[in-house]
Image: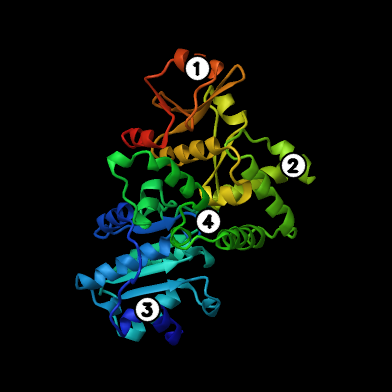
Amino acid sequence: MKDLLYQYNPWWEESFINEGVKPREKYLCELRKYLEFKQIIILTGLRRVGKTTLMKIIIEELIAEGTSPKHILYVSLDDYLLHNNNIIEIVNEFRKIHKIKIEEKIYLFLDEVTYKEDFHVQLKNIYDTQNTKLFVASSSASMLRDKKASLTGRAITIEIKPLDFEEYLFFNGITIKKRDRQLYKSHFLDYCKVGGLPENVLHPSREYLMNLVDDIIQKDITAFHAIKNHQIVRDYFTLLMERSGKQLSINKIGKILDISPDTSKRYLTFFESTYLIHLLPRWGKTNQKLLSAKKIYASDLGIKYMFVGERDLGSYFENYIYLMLRNKKILYYLYEDTTEIDFFTEDKILIESKFYSELNKKQEKLFNEYPANKKLLIDSVEKLAVLQKL
């Protein structure tokens, strides 16, 4: 194990600089803020969204600010060579290598933490008995679920999302001046094709995105849930992408794939828990919220584009607005008398997206007449800034 840990932690022997890495300041600011907190920081979100990169940047900053490099451990717990070692054994080996006493503070960065059985209990044990600051990461919400509440009060969870449009422009070194506002639309269309996964933004590749989806389906869904028919899960995801931005009928998808409604519902939860999709309930009374069909959105526009292509550009715009508002507001879609308005927030803000187009007559009537505290018609990329202020 010793040699492997040295491979993971080059800063133990040499200077460490994250070369060619673009910083994501909105997340780094949050992580820096929590460095002085005792709580475990759990980073979650879609695979390859940049969780590991953020941890490596924090490691670089800790060393630059005077933390001993030998008091910092990074390791990816999905490594086959660590298959027979639990987290506590790995941490004990780390302390032994550098002769670190139990009362001396260490910084632990544990990637893919859910690959270790009983990881919640082990993290609790380390938190309660050692002088540590723990950062852990996982790409699966369902695997992170703490059924025994071992980490209640001991952890702060931060979801890392794909790059938003502004970050996409920054990563590409694009600055749009006020006099060139007309360029926003063409750059946004490029963003729809590439998406917001950092590596793919820097080096766009359809193969990269396809491999990512296959990786998630194989490692986080079919292997984890012991599903033998891999192809039916891939077909299921293709149908989800084709329906993104629309109300989703679990029964219809089940009939197309010749699986039961219960199996169809189960597969849907698997894709949601791995952050490939998000679901939006309907606004209404409690039974309407629970029983009505949910709308589905892709977590990354590049993945959606890979399956759908340039069909219905308005659905990309709506999907992006959803991603902007998600976790910022409690969201629903509004559906009245066969007419739909894209979003209605719990604090009664009505929002309709139109990609350089106009409301139809039924939508206009519902939009104008429905009681709301505020109404926003977002009909161009330039108007997206309004949503930042909500």
Name the disc covering residue 140, or none.
Answer: 4
Label 1 or label 3, whichever lies nearer to me, is 1
Residue at the spot of label 1? 364
Q: Amino acid at mark 3?
A: Asn
Tag shown at residue 254: 2
Upstream in sequence: badge 2 or badge 3: 3
Rounded to the nearest angstrom, the CA distance separating label 4 from label 2 is: 24 Å
How packed mark 4 is, by other alpha carbons closer than 10 Å (few <14, some 14-19, many 20 or more), is: many
Q: Position of residue 367 (x, y in %)?
A: 47, 18
Query: Which of the labelled discs sits on residue 9, or is there none?
Result: 3
Label 3 crowd bin: few (<14), some (14–19), many (20+), radius 10 Å: some
State the CA–CA distance, disc 4 to disc 1: 40 Å
CA gap, disc 2 to disc 1?
35 Å
Name the spot of residue 373 as percent of width and height, x first: 37, 19
Amino acid under disc 2: Gly
Q: Quadrant of residue 339?
A: top right
Furthest residue toward left = 66
Q: What's the amino acid at mark 4?
A: Ser
- The C terminus is located in which quarter? top left
Residue 260 vertical placement versus 93 (above, below): above
